[in-house]
Amino acid sequence: MVLYMANIHHIVKTDLNDNPCVNCGACCAYFRVSFYWAEAQNGGGIIPQELTEQISPFMSCMKGTNQKQNTRCVALTGKIGQCVSCSIYAARPTPCREFAESGLNGIHNEACDRARAAYGLPPLQPHKPRIAC
Protein backbone atom coordinates (compact mmCIF):
# COMPACT_ATOMS: atom_id res chain seq x y z
CA MET A 1 0.00 0.00 0.00
CA VAL A 2 1.37 3.42 -0.90
CA LEU A 3 0.41 6.59 0.95
CA TYR A 4 0.85 9.97 -0.73
CA MET A 5 1.56 12.89 1.54
CA ALA A 6 2.98 16.15 0.20
CA ASN A 7 4.52 14.31 -2.76
CA ILE A 8 6.43 12.00 -0.38
CA HIS A 9 5.88 8.30 -0.94
CA HIS A 10 5.73 5.97 2.07
CA ILE A 11 5.26 2.23 1.87
CA VAL A 12 3.30 0.60 4.69
CA LYS A 13 4.51 -2.93 5.31
CA THR A 14 1.69 -5.45 5.50
CA ASP A 15 3.74 -8.61 5.98
CA LEU A 16 1.61 -11.45 7.39
CA ASN A 17 4.30 -11.94 10.04
CA ASP A 18 3.26 -8.53 11.42
CA ASN A 19 -0.21 -9.92 12.23
CA PRO A 20 -0.10 -11.43 15.76
CA CYS A 21 -3.35 -13.32 15.14
CA VAL A 22 -1.62 -15.85 12.87
CA ASN A 23 0.59 -16.76 15.82
CA CYS A 24 -2.21 -16.84 18.42
CA GLY A 25 -5.73 -18.22 17.89
CA ALA A 26 -6.61 -17.94 21.59
CA CYS A 27 -9.90 -16.14 20.95
CA CYS A 28 -11.03 -18.99 18.66
CA ALA A 29 -10.42 -21.47 21.47
CA TYR A 30 -11.72 -19.44 24.39
CA PHE A 31 -15.00 -17.72 23.48
CA ARG A 32 -18.31 -19.03 22.20
CA VAL A 33 -18.71 -17.76 18.64
CA SER A 34 -22.43 -17.07 18.49
CA PHE A 35 -24.24 -15.25 15.69
CA TYR A 36 -27.67 -14.71 14.13
CA TRP A 37 -28.75 -18.02 12.61
CA ALA A 38 -29.26 -16.54 9.12
CA GLU A 39 -25.50 -16.03 8.71
CA ALA A 40 -25.29 -19.81 8.13
CA GLN A 41 -26.08 -21.40 4.78
CA ASN A 42 -29.54 -22.67 5.76
CA GLY A 43 -30.55 -19.06 6.44
CA GLY A 44 -29.10 -17.76 3.18
CA GLY A 45 -25.70 -16.85 4.66
CA ILE A 46 -22.21 -18.05 3.81
CA ILE A 47 -21.08 -19.94 6.93
CA PRO A 48 -20.94 -23.67 6.14
CA GLN A 49 -23.97 -25.19 7.88
CA GLU A 50 -22.12 -28.35 8.95
CA LEU A 51 -19.76 -26.23 11.08
CA THR A 52 -22.55 -24.66 13.14
CA GLU A 53 -24.94 -25.66 15.88
CA GLN A 54 -28.21 -24.00 16.85
CA ILE A 55 -28.32 -22.60 20.40
CA SER A 56 -31.73 -20.89 20.32
CA PRO A 57 -34.44 -20.19 17.74
CA PHE A 58 -32.51 -17.14 16.54
CA MET A 59 -28.89 -17.86 17.42
CA SER A 60 -26.31 -20.36 16.22
CA CYS A 61 -22.66 -20.84 17.09
CA MET A 62 -19.58 -22.39 15.60
CA LYS A 63 -19.25 -26.04 16.59
CA GLY A 64 -16.74 -26.56 19.35
CA THR A 65 -17.35 -23.19 20.99
CA ASN A 66 -20.53 -23.97 22.93
CA GLN A 67 -18.83 -25.82 25.76
CA LYS A 68 -17.01 -24.85 28.95
CA GLN A 69 -14.07 -27.24 28.60
CA ASN A 70 -11.93 -27.91 25.54
CA THR A 71 -13.49 -24.95 23.74
CA ARG A 72 -12.14 -24.65 20.21
CA CYS A 73 -13.80 -23.53 17.01
CA VAL A 74 -14.02 -26.35 14.50
CA ALA A 75 -12.74 -23.98 11.80
CA LEU A 76 -9.49 -23.23 13.66
CA THR A 77 -6.46 -25.06 12.31
CA GLY A 78 -2.97 -25.17 13.77
CA LYS A 79 -1.49 -24.89 17.25
CA ILE A 80 -2.59 -22.06 19.54
CA GLY A 81 0.23 -19.66 20.31
CA GLN A 82 2.35 -20.86 17.39
CA CYS A 83 0.74 -20.89 13.97
CA VAL A 84 -3.02 -20.87 13.32
CA SER A 85 -5.53 -20.04 10.62
CA CYS A 86 -9.25 -20.11 9.99
CA SER A 87 -10.35 -22.70 7.47
CA ILE A 88 -13.38 -20.54 6.56
CA TYR A 89 -11.78 -17.10 6.88
CA ALA A 90 -13.67 -15.59 3.93
CA ALA A 91 -16.95 -17.02 5.29
CA ARG A 92 -16.38 -16.42 9.01
CA PRO A 93 -19.25 -15.10 11.17
CA THR A 94 -19.75 -11.51 12.27
CA PRO A 95 -18.20 -11.90 15.77
CA CYS A 96 -14.97 -13.10 14.16
CA ARG A 97 -14.97 -10.25 11.66
CA GLU A 98 -15.50 -7.71 14.45
CA PHE A 99 -13.04 -9.11 17.01
CA ALA A 100 -9.86 -7.05 16.94
CA GLU A 101 -6.46 -7.81 18.36
CA SER A 102 -5.65 -5.81 21.46
CA GLY A 103 -3.68 -2.67 20.65
CA LEU A 104 -4.74 -2.49 17.00
CA ASN A 105 -4.89 1.19 16.07
CA GLY A 106 -4.15 2.00 19.71
CA ILE A 107 -7.40 0.43 20.97
CA HIS A 108 -7.17 -1.96 23.93
CA ASN A 109 -9.27 -5.15 23.72
CA GLU A 110 -9.51 -6.71 27.17
CA ALA A 111 -11.20 -9.80 25.71
CA CYS A 112 -8.15 -10.48 23.53
CA ASP A 113 -5.86 -10.15 26.55
CA ARG A 114 -8.11 -12.49 28.59
CA ALA A 115 -8.11 -15.18 25.89
CA ARG A 116 -4.34 -14.93 25.46
CA ALA A 117 -3.80 -15.17 29.22
CA ALA A 118 -5.86 -18.37 29.33
CA TYR A 119 -3.23 -19.93 27.04
CA GLY A 120 -0.22 -18.45 28.83
CA LEU A 121 0.37 -15.81 26.16
CA PRO A 122 1.36 -12.25 27.13
CA PRO A 123 -0.88 -9.29 26.28
CA LEU A 124 -0.20 -7.71 22.92
CA GLN A 125 1.58 -4.41 22.70
CA PRO A 126 0.07 -1.57 20.65
CA HIS A 127 0.58 -2.30 16.97
CA LYS A 128 1.34 0.37 14.42
CA PRO A 129 2.20 -0.24 10.78
CA ARG A 130 5.89 0.12 10.05
CA ILE A 131 6.73 2.75 7.46
CA ALA A 132 9.68 2.13 5.20
CA CYS A 133 11.39 5.19 3.71
Image: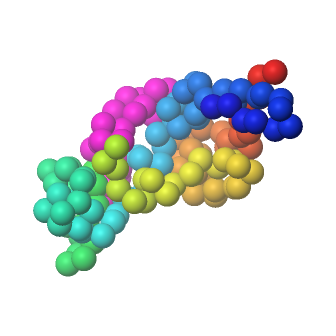
Q: Quadrant of residue 131?
A: top right
Give the image location of residue 76, x and y in percent.
34, 39
Image vertical order of residue 79 relative to residue 105, above or below: above
Q: Quick check: is 66 in the magenta stretch?
A: yes
- Would residue 29 be visible to someone looking at this image? yes
Instruction: Report the span colored magenta.
Output: 65-89
Residue ID at (50%, 32%): 22
Q: Residue at x 64, y 56 (%)?
A: 109
Number of residue marks: 0
In the picture provided, is 116 more to the left or to the right than 61?
right
Image coords of residue 79 (percent x, y): 41, 29
Image position of 128 with respect to 109: above or below: above
Image spot of residue 105 (x, y percent): 70, 49
Q: Main secondary structure of the magenta part?
A: loop
| Residue plotted at (58% across, 39% down) | 120
Residue 15, image x, y percentages: 59, 25
Q: Is residue 6 magenta?
A: no
Instruction: Using the image, determine if residue 130 lies above or below residue 44.
Output: above
* Picture residue at 27% right of the left edge, 62% below the top: 39
